[in-house]
Image (spheres, grey):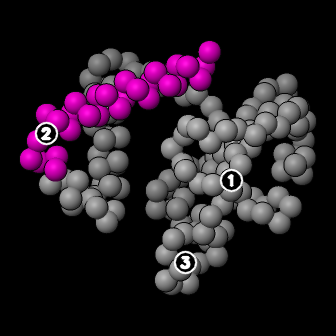
Amino acid sequence: MKSLFPGATVIDVAKRPLERGGSLVAGERLWVLIQNQDGTYHIKELKPYVDAALTKYLSQADPYERVEDLRRIYWPGINPSIYGLVEVSGKKYWIREKKVEVLSYKNRAEEDEARIYMANIIGLTQAQQQDGPKLLEGISKDPERFKDAVKKYVKDYLGLAGLSME
């Protein structure tokens, strides 16, 4: 584990339960607490890498190439160390830093502009998924129901995020 974090001290490793989170990938989730040489602490999460479901039907690119494609398509210009793929004891893991980010805006108009931008990116991504057109049709039929569902989701998510900070 230490070889993953050169120049840093591994303080602790914890296995996170799978009761929560956006991914239902079977297997352990590891959180690694490290301290850099400058004294700062960071939590790194390792999640087991699983081949794409399409692998059962069609040969896929090498996992490391796929990560590069994901970065190029979804995260252009993002520092590659933010989200990557590593190998530990012969197993591949997704690795990323766990952190709380708080966005601050100069005014309400800037905040609204950011929300519209993020919603657009999410919408474009969902529209490209297999059930994207069906989702759009459902939203079009009853936009108020969709808005209410999103509000409930955000409220529940923020509640869980608040609990995780306690």
Q: Which residue is mark 1?
A: 27
Q: Is residue 142 magenta?
A: yes
Of residues 69 and 50, the one drawn nearer to the viewer in this rendering = 50
Measure how far apart labels 2 and 3 are at the Cα level.
Answer: 36 Å
Location of residue 83 in the rendering, given as x and y in whole percent from the top left corner: 63, 50
Give the residue type at disc 3: Thr
Give the residue type at disc 2: Pro
First-in-chain label (1 vs 2): 1
Quarter of the view holding residue 10: top right
Give the residue type at disc 1: Gly
Looking at the image, is mark 1 or mark 2 nearer the viewer? Answer: 1
First-in-chain label (2 vs 3): 3
Seen in the picture, residue 70 relative to 24 is either above or below; the reply is below
Q: Which residue is mark 2?
A: 143
Sort mark 1 into few (<14), some (14-19) or many (20+) by Cα contacts within 10 Å: few
First-in-chain label (3 vs 1): 1
Residue 113 seen? no
Sort mark 3 into few (<14), some (14-19) or many (20+) by Cα contacts within 10 Å: few
Location of residue 54 in the rendering, given as x and y in whole percent from the top left corner: 49, 75
x 46%, y 56%: residue: 74
Provide the secondary structure element on which disc 2 rests. Answer: helix
Of residues 121 and 151, the one drawn nearer to the viewer in this rendering = 151
x 22%, y 30%: residue: 148
x 60%, y 69%: residue: 51
Q: Is residue 71 left or right of residue 7?
A: left
| Span highlighted in magenta in the image | 138-166
Sort mark 2 into few (<14), some (14-19) or many (20+) by Cα contacts within 10 Å: few
Provide the secondary structure element on which disc 1 rests. Answer: loop
Looking at the image, is mark 3 or mark 1 nearer the viewer? Answer: 1
Q: Is residue 83 magenta?
A: no
Measure how far apart labels 3 and 1 are at the Cα level.
Answer: 19 Å
